[in-house]
Amino acid sequence: MSYQQKIDNREVPVPSSANRIVTITMKDNDQTINAKVGDTIIVSLGEQQNWQVKLSDDKILAAFTNGIFYIHMPQGRYKAIQPGTVEISATGSPKCAKGTMCAMYLLAFHTTVAVSQ
């Protein structure tokens, strides 16, 4: 490990060679994604729904802001901080203008991220 990075007030060792950005999209539903410690994980499920994203373990992936401006805002930005497996699940509900009729449905999303050294 070459340096420490502060994420959520925790000092996290990050290897200097780990600078990949792994983007998770709807096509990764029910898939396993491989990442390495130090990788940035971007969850980008689209803007058509209001998404609520949950992680099964925040000791493997830590939420952070990376200072990058996104034209299409992702639903989550995470840093892989230690080896292990974490489940990412999300539910998407329709975006409805106040006072208008709206379809009632939920979309479900699930993927597994396997983080290695």
Image (cartoon, helix red, strand yellow):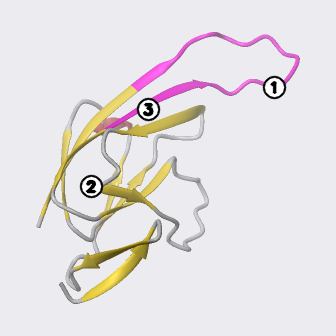
Tag 1: residue type? Answer: Ala
Question: Residue under circle 1?
Answer: 97
Question: Which of these two is toward me, 64 or 109?
Answer: 64
Tag 3: residue type? Answer: Ala
Q: Is residue 76 left or right of residue 79?
A: right
Q: Judging from the image, what secondary structure is the residue with disc 1 in?
A: loop
Q: Position of residue 87 (x, y in %)?
A: 27, 38
Question: Residue under circle 3?
Answer: 90
Tag 2: residue type? Answer: Ile
Mark 2–mark 3 Cα distance, whole angstroms, equals 18 Å
Q: Judging from the image, what secondary structure is the residue with disc 3 in?
A: strand
Marks 2 and 3 in Cβ contact (< 8 Å): no
| Quarter that holds the C terminus | bottom left
Magenta span: 88-108
Q: Position of residue 96 (x, y in %)?
A: 74, 24
Q: Residues within 10 Å of mark 3 (few under 14, many from 20)?
A: some
Q: Residues within 10 Å of mark 2 (few under 14, many from 20)?
A: many
Mark 1–mark 2 Cα distance, whole angstroms, equals 37 Å
Q: Quadrant of residue 110?
A: top left
Please report whichever mark, 1 or 2, sits nearer to the chain's N-terminal start: 2
Question: Which of these two is toward me, 105 or 6?
Answer: 6
- Give me the residue at 53% from left, 34% from top: 52
Marks 1 and 3 in Cβ contact (< 8 Å): no
